[in-house]
Image (cartoon, grey):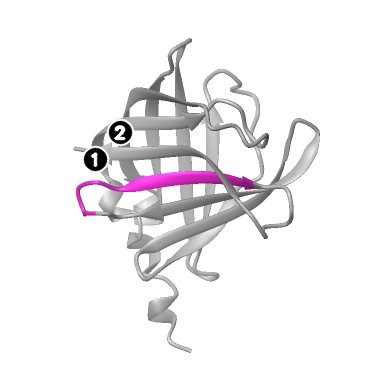
């Protein structure tokens, strides 16, 4: 098996290090087939940690109804070639969910976790893509049927 195509290692998120302007598009009502979205701006500053085997970013999200801060922590396990991703919402600082886990293949990062949403068991998926090196995109989707179908509910487009 050619593992080079499965992952590129701890440098997978090198494209994301630095300061970013963020355009958010977030579905207002999730998992009810709603087509109502809200759009808002934000900022993100990302840096390497753990000698390059991790990174974190500090986010400011300017939602229409409130502004809040959040942090993403990512760590790379060189034994499993997998990333773990945690999100800490500044409004709920004592809550840390199970990490998203995944890896990059052919320049696309896909990460999964099991979670709960409004009392229902769901799967969560993050997808990182690079439409151009200067404009990374992150998407979040939920599935209520073990990953057979997905509803994208949050898109973040980054620019320098």
Secondary structure of residue under mark 1: strand
Which residue position is annotated with label 1? 18
Q: Quadrant of residue 151?
A: top right
Where residue 71 appears, x then y in whole percent?
Answer: 46, 32
Residue that extends furthest to the top in the rendered view of this protein: 65
Residue at 39 percent of width and 25 percent of height? 39
Q: Quadrant of the C terminus?
A: top left
Location of residue 70 with respect to 73 vertically, above or below? above
Q: Which residues are magenta?
A: 132-142
Q: Quadrant of residue 64?
A: top left
Classify mark 2: residues with Cα within 10 Å, few (<14), some (14-19) or many (20+).
some
Viewer-proximal residue among 88 and 141: 141
Q: Is residue 43 magenta?
A: no
135 or 48, nearer to the observer = 135
- The residue that appears at 48% across and 89% down in the rendered structure is 1
Q: Secondary structure at mark 2?
A: strand
Front in this rendered view, residue 17 or 153: 153
Q: Position of residue 119 (x, y in %)?
A: 80, 33
User: Residue placed at 49% from the left, 69% from the top?
Assistant: 81
User: Which numbered disc covers residue 140?
Assistant: none
Q: Which residue is mark 2?
A: 45
């Amino acid at each position: 098996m050619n593992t080079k195509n499965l992952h590129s290692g701890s440098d997978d998120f090198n494209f994301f290090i630095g300061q970013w302007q963020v355009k958010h598009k977030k579905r207002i009502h999730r998992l009810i087939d709603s087509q109502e979205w809200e759009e808002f701006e934000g900022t993100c500053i990302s840096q390497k940690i753990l000698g390059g085997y991790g990174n974190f970013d500090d986010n400011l999200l300017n939602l229409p109804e409130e502004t809040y801060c959040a942090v993403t922590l990512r760590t790379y396990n060189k034994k499993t070639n997998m990333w773990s991703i945690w999100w800490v919402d500044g409004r709920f600082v004592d809550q840390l969910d199970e990490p998203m886990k995944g890896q990059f293949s052919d320049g696309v990062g896909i990460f999964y976790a099991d979670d709960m949403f409004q009392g229902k068991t769901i799967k969560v998926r993050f997808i990182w893509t690079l439409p151009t090196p200067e404009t990374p995109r992150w998407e979040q989707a939920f599935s209520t049927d073990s990953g057979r179908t997905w509803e994208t509910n949050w898109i973040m487009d980054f620019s320098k």
